[in-house]
Image (cartoon, rainbow, N blue to C red):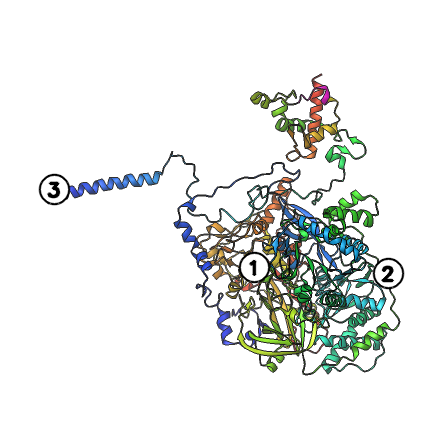
Amino acid sequence: MRARDDVVTAVMRAGARAGVLLALLVAVGCRGCTSRRPPIHLNPNMDDQPRYGAQGPSPFFYSGSTSQAPVPETIARGELEEDEAYVTGRAPARGYIDNPQEPSEETLARGEERYRIYCSPCHASSGDGRGTVYQRSGLESTDLREPRVRDLADGEIFEVISEGRGLMEGYAFPINVGDRWAIVEHVRRLQRESR
Amino acid sequence: MNPAAPETSKRYWRSLERLYRSPALSELADGEFPAGAAELPKGVTRRGMLELLGASFALAGLASCRRPEHEIVPFVIAPESTIPGVSKRYATTLPWGWHGHGVVVESHEGRPTKVEGNELHPFSLGGASAWMQASILDLYDPDRSSRVMWRSEHETPLSPSSWEDFLTFWEETAPELDDTRGGDLAVLSAPASSPTLFRQRELFLERFPEARWVVHEPLGPENVLEGVRRLTGRALRPVLHLERARRIVCLDADILLTEAEAVTQARGFARGRRVDGVNEEMNRLYAVESTLSLTGANADHRLAVPSHRVGAVLAALAVELEGLGVPVGVESVDLPDFDEDVRDAIAILARDLAAFPERSLVATGYRQPPAVHALALAVNRALGAIGTTLTLHEDDHLSWGRSSELAELAEAMHGGTVRTLVVLGGNPVYTAPADLELSKALSAVDNVIQLSTHLDETSDHASWHLPQTHSLEAWGDVRAADGTLSIVQPLIAPLFRGRSAIEIVASMLEDRFEEGYRLVRDTWKDHVFQGEDVEPRWRRTLHDGVLESSALDSPEISFEEGAVQRAFGSLVNVSAREGELELVLVPSASTYDGRFANNAWLQELPDPITKLTWGNAALVSPATARELGVDTGDVVALELGGHRVETPLMVLPGQADGSIALALGYGRTKSGRVGDGVGVDAFQLTTSEAPHAVMGLGVDRVGRRHDFAFTQEHWSMEGRDLVREATLEDYRNEPPAGREHLGHDAPALWEAPSLEGDYQWGMTVDLNACIGCNACVTACQSENNIPVVGKAQVERSREMHWLRIDRYFSGRPEEPRVSFQPVPCMHCENAPCEQVCPVGATVHDGEGLNVMVYNRCIGTRYCSNNCPYKVRRFNFFNFTAEYTETVKMLMNPDVTVRSRGVMEKCSYCVQRVNEAKITADGEGRQLRDGDVRAACEQTCPSQAIVFGNVADLESRVSREKRNRRNYVLLEEMNNKPRTSYLAKIHNPHPDWKSDASAG
């Protein structure tokens, strides 16, 4: 009957519209929705392999990390530091040493750059100890130009950079030995220029 | 058969069945994967089913559909020089018996991941054996014990305890032992060559003067060192220098695999076989042995003689030499009774040795009695070998296991006079001769303190079990074969709360725990450096892995009066025992003496000669098998002195008639999940009188059959000439020996890849240098995270080794010639595999590497189908699903760990290529020859493999490829492989009578 046909057609059209809407919804997804859960990932392939990557988690080690510190007193290839004073700032018999690196254009530039990257957040680019950290939190760092610091030997400043002092952590990991001496040079320059 | 392929004058055959064309084998060998390989295995276990269905379950489940969350857990305080992702290398030493091996271990973020040889160590020179490579898996073995355990009485089970409790126990027990001055105290130690442990031992015996300290070494050098001592009166370390030898005779001595310094001996041997000009001189190796060993397989000539007759051969040889004017010092009495062939052969040996004074060598194997070693030393001295091809180094502290001492200790234990026994490493209940009944003896001891890495067979009788550290996680020191000193430094803190032997002995002396570092440091400060300049020398030794110039002196030696004649006299009259079967117990090339039974890599490593995995077999010659009415696969009962062992049997060409060989180190019951129940325990047939070889064996068929997991008949290369061989004569006379050029100008079927990279990678394998030792296979497995598949899958030809070593026999089964050929991926320029992959998962990069893209692979396996070299491996299952945490640590982070359904194959160690490129970029330069070393190339003890840039005409690999002997496999197929081979040249003696055609 005609009326029936109309109804059927209407239903079919509605169904088609609904279908298109559904298809659009599926195609578009839940764009703009936020979720705390990770996205659906149906094909894991080998995204998660049974191996330890650098800096990954490990349920085996007490530290929870796959990264393990070298066993104390072991020496890797390429890490035979013949000159102990150069890498620690302290010679066994003589105590703290002076900066063994000859100052040059490059070392000054390098020292300044490294200082800016690693030291200036706390100690500020002028060395007055009121860097960004102070501005955000009120925590003052040592003023590198004060007499107490001027009186320190180069080697002791090197040691402080390497191992930290007080609230400051050691920076031996991110800054290599040559760069640390360059930073010492830069600190000396800040001290000279602030007289 | 390709009509264009050259007619081979030699017939190569893979096994006896193949030679005699059994119908069952044709079916097996004609398909790449044997029948049934593509179907589900029968009797699939519940776990197996779940594994198979795991994928679909994972998809069906909703919760696991999400991308997993990964945490970053960095160091809180990072160590100074550790850059995440960049590996470091530490030089250390792996102790082994009375010597040790220098290694350099690669460590990622403080976890050791790969062992390499130490190029600075005189007994490695950069090479490492399969055992050294696989030892890293033992470090991470999840079956290692991790608790101090204790039991109150012998029948109760072990219960967990602690180091403190042990110390308390010792503090209470020690005073009683002091009272008796150690009269009821004994130490049963595994062999060690450690100055620190020796110093501890001295202090121990000072405190307990009446105590016994016995070293037990099942496959030790007792006979060798005793023979030397009988002749010279001194404790001397013998060292072979094969690179200086032009003629070498091995008497039951597998110098290329199991005798002391196999790594450098292989290198020296290969140096003498290098042929790259027209008139190169080659050395010549003769082997006289009862079973087909690796040395015998590489020998130019071989005499198969039962083990008990080898001494008579040496005696006959000594007489022949004396007759030629070589002053051995023997009076020729009646010659031993040998067949004419054998006598002629011995005459040839004598003439050949005598023709090269100071450049010849007679090597004798550890199984032979002391008289053989003594007489051989006399022969060597007469030949002028001492000081050139053989050096002897004096070591007053040299200690080795003496079976008489063990027997006395066992008797004392049975008699109840030992109340406290300390077992320092090793597994004496498993390895001691069966007639000592050591397990019963241990039950009679009140306190058995056992230091061991696993809860093993000996732990069943221990009252205290102490977990032992592995040598990669402990401090120690080692004297190498010539006395060269090196330090063992740990790569990681003890993983399983273990302590080392030196720490345990020190704790027994001090009543508290001392760090191993302190103990080693003190020994070196006082005894090695004598207090001079300690710190810099110590650090340099740690860094290099060896103390320079620390070899022990080679003194002038003189022989004791009449010693030579006495040794000769005891050997010359040993006649053949007709009608009696001899049993020879040999070390397993995989598990050695059982210490590696739980090492899955080694269990799955095919034995170099039999290609057997996951088990051992009694080896029998074809003639003896016919006499006994047995065949390969029969299970037989071996009966000896009341002990009976049922073992499967294999007919091995080249085995001496009347002699049956069986490998030790299997049939363990308490090794861990990998090794338990694998193979048959041959130690049950050892006696303290005859731990190595014995007569009077009874053999009976049991009626059962056994399925072996061979890799031997798989990937069979159907009659094509894959190993090209020639004799030195032919090579010299006909320039392109063994080389015909075929089909080079055939048009390609498809477009050639554009090869425009800066470097073009290629590889050569020198078949003259390859001895078939399997070190490269294990190194590849370690470097590339290759999984282990287990015995059932190996039976289906599904082992995953990217690099395989094919072993071919030729000649008569009674006198076979053996050829080895390592086969990695050929990286063909016209690769057949690349053309058929439907999804483009295997493509060619601009530098000539055939590259496998794992995540594109959908597992059609068409590439493997099309590969004529059959170098591709498919992950039929997810072999890595059940990796424990410690095994995950071992995986090389630079290489993907593959899951199921992906194809994999040799990648020319592309991760090493990339690492070298990154380093070179950082230094602003191009890669130099030698910057990149493939894992197989680096570890090969004989330096057979060379990898590098073929576009650089001066690189080593280019020079190798210009060698006349260079050829590629299946040249007529026009695949243009980048991996080529240098044809094998051997050096037969012109007078040697043999039906084995040489080429």
Q: How far across and how far down the image is residue B408, in percent?
A: 76, 67
Amino acid type, residue under disc 1 in the picture = Arg
Res B999 visible:
no
User: Which residue is nearer to you in this view: B577 or B546?
Assistant: B577
Q: Chain of mark 2?
A: B
Local crowd size for mark 2, using a 10 Å CA cut-off: few (<14), some (14–19), many (≥20): few
Quarter of the C terminus of chain A within the rendering: top right
User: Which residue is nearer to you in this view: B872 or B689?
Assistant: B689
By secondary structure, the bulk of the magenta-drawn segment is best described as: loop
Task: Indicate the quadrant where residue B214 lies.
Answer: bottom right
Amino acid type, residue under disc 2 in the picture = Pro
Q: How far across and how far down the image is residue B747, in percent?
A: 50, 59
Q: Which residue is outermost to the top?
A: A195
Disc 1 element: loop
User: Which residue is nearer to you in this view: A182 or B62?
Assistant: B62
Local crowd size for mark 3, using a 10 Å CA cut-off: few (<14), some (14–19), many (≥20): few
Q: In the rendered view, tell whether residue B304 sits above or below residue A54.
A: below
Of badges 2 and 3, nearer the viewer stands 2
Residue B673 shows which numbered tag?
1
Quarter of the N terminus of chain A within the rendering: top left
Q: Which residue is outermost to the right?
A: B561
Q: Which residues are magenta?
A: A142-149
Q: Are marks 1 and 2 on the same chain?
A: yes
**Residue at image point 55% right, 42% down:** A56
Q: Which residue is mark 3?
A: A3
